[in-house]
Image (tube, rainbow, N blue to C red):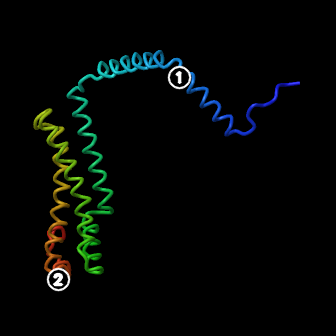
Amino acid sequence: MGRPRLYNTPEETKAAKAASSKRSYQRHRDEINEKRKKKYRKTKKKNTNAESPCSIKSRLGFCVERSESIASRLTKLCQPERASYLDKICATFMREKTMECIESHIGKVDKLQASIRKYEDAVISLSGIGAAYEGIKKVSQDVREVVGDLEEISCAALLGVDEVENMWNARKFSYQEK
């Protein structure tokens, strides 16, 4: 016949195991701490030695890749095309009569503009004006044009809904003249 159970519930078993672990740790605390310190020192040294400076080409490639990502995000934001995107914003403003719809879109495009400026500056400092910079400059111009068009709509909106409606119907916004 087997020995009688000491613990009948899972909670009692868990509590007994925790107490046993605590007693064991108290007995071997110094050894355990020394092992942990050695392990920490080894991993810390590995991490500092593993860090090597990025090459200029890889950083340049990263910036170009990110600028392409920003271009695709701008295209996705302005789908199907820029003029219809801006027309939708004007129509929403005329319908809802609040600046929030325009300001939210300006905020989205401003984030893209801040990102592309950062990569544009990085490319200039890494390689100067060259092929990589020209590609990023094109994306930067596209983003600036959208921001400019949104700010033009915003300025007209400050004058009122009637002003936006008159300018939109007369096709006087700069994006409509293209």
Which residue of the protein is positioned furthest toward the bottom in this rendering?
A: 162
Measured in 3D between alpha carbons, the distance from the residue under mark 1 to the one under mark 2, in whole angstroms, is 80 Å
- Residue 108 in percent (x, y) is at 26, 59
Secondary structure found at label 1? helix
Q: Is residue 152 left or right of residue 43?
A: left
Badge 1: how crowded within 10 Å, few (<14), some, or many (20+)?
some
Which residue of the protein is positioned furthest toward the left in this rendering?
A: 129
- Residue 147 in percent (x, y) is at 18, 61
Above or below 146: residue 137: above
Badge 2: how crowded within 10 Å, few (<14), some, or many (20+)?
few
Secondary structure found at label 2? helix
- Residue 137 in percent (x, y) is at 16, 47
Q: Which amino acid does label 1 sit on?
A: Tyr
Residue at (12, 38) in percent of width and height: 124
Which residue of the protein is positioned furthest toward the right in this rendering?
A: 1
From the viewer's side, name the closer residue of 88 and 108: 108
Above or below 174: residue 167: below
Residue at (28, 40) in percent of width and height: 65
From the viewer's side, name the closer residue of 81 and 58: 58
Q: Which residue carries the number 2 mark?
A: 166
Q: Which residue carries the number 1 mark?
A: 25
Q: What residue type is labelled 2?
A: Asn
Please state, as top left, top right, bottom left or bottom right, where the N terminus lies in the image.
top right
From the viewer's side, name the closer residue of 26 and 69: 26
Above or below 66: residue 162: below
Q: Is residue 22 left or right of residue 117?
A: right
